[in-house]
Image: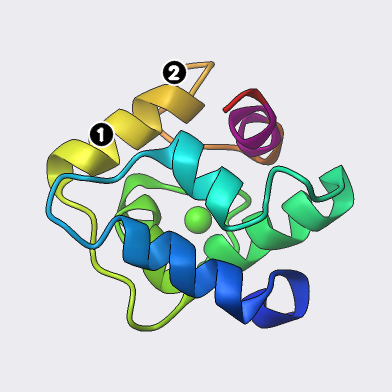
Amino acid sequence: MAMMDLLSAEEIKAAVGAFSAAESFCHKKFFEIVGLKKKSPEDVKKVFHILDKDRSGFIEEDELKFVLQGFTPTGRVLSDKETKTLLAAGDKDGDGKIGIDEFITLVVES
Ligand SMILES: [Ca+2]
């Protein structure tokens, strides 16, 4: 399963492009522009598994940093500050990583 099978190329391009400036990343707007918010929980789970590159069952900080590249190879790398903000927004149980249920909540609540 590839990201392009789940989301439209136009929306991915628009979403990644919207946050190309340093320190500009906003996950709420990103999930909306990229079209993830309107997807079913099943599709959001598929996106989670794509972003979980090492298949650990969690999106860890080092995977979050490259989250935009999970959507498109040209996506920029998030700064440490952006990564920590995103992790804090999603990590409800405080274990330092984002589980699948936390990811769905993060997308839906955003
Ligand atoms: Ca992982």
Q: Is mark 1 within 8 Å of ligand 1?
A: no
Look at the picture and state if 47 lies above or below 53: above
Question: Is 44 placed left or right of 81 in the picture?
Answer: right
Give the extent of the magenta segment.
Answer: 102-108
Asked if residue 103 lies in the magenta stretch, the reply is: yes
Residue in the image at 29% along x and 45% along y: 25
Q: Which residue is denoted by mark 2 in the rendering?
A: 94
**Quadrant (top left, top right, bottom left, bottom right) of the C terminus:** top right
| Residue 7 visible here | yes
Tell me the quadrant of the picture where the N terminus can be found: bottom right
What is the magenta segment's predominant secondary structure? helix
Q: Nearer the viewer, residue 7 or 43?
A: 7
Secondary structure at numbered mark 2: loop
Q: Residue 82 sits in which quadrant?
A: top left
SS under mark 1: helix
Residue 74 shown left or right of residue 79 in the figure: right
Three-letter amino acid code at disc 1? Lys
- Residue type at mark 2: give it: Gly
Q: Residue 94 appears at what percent x and percent y?
A: 44, 18
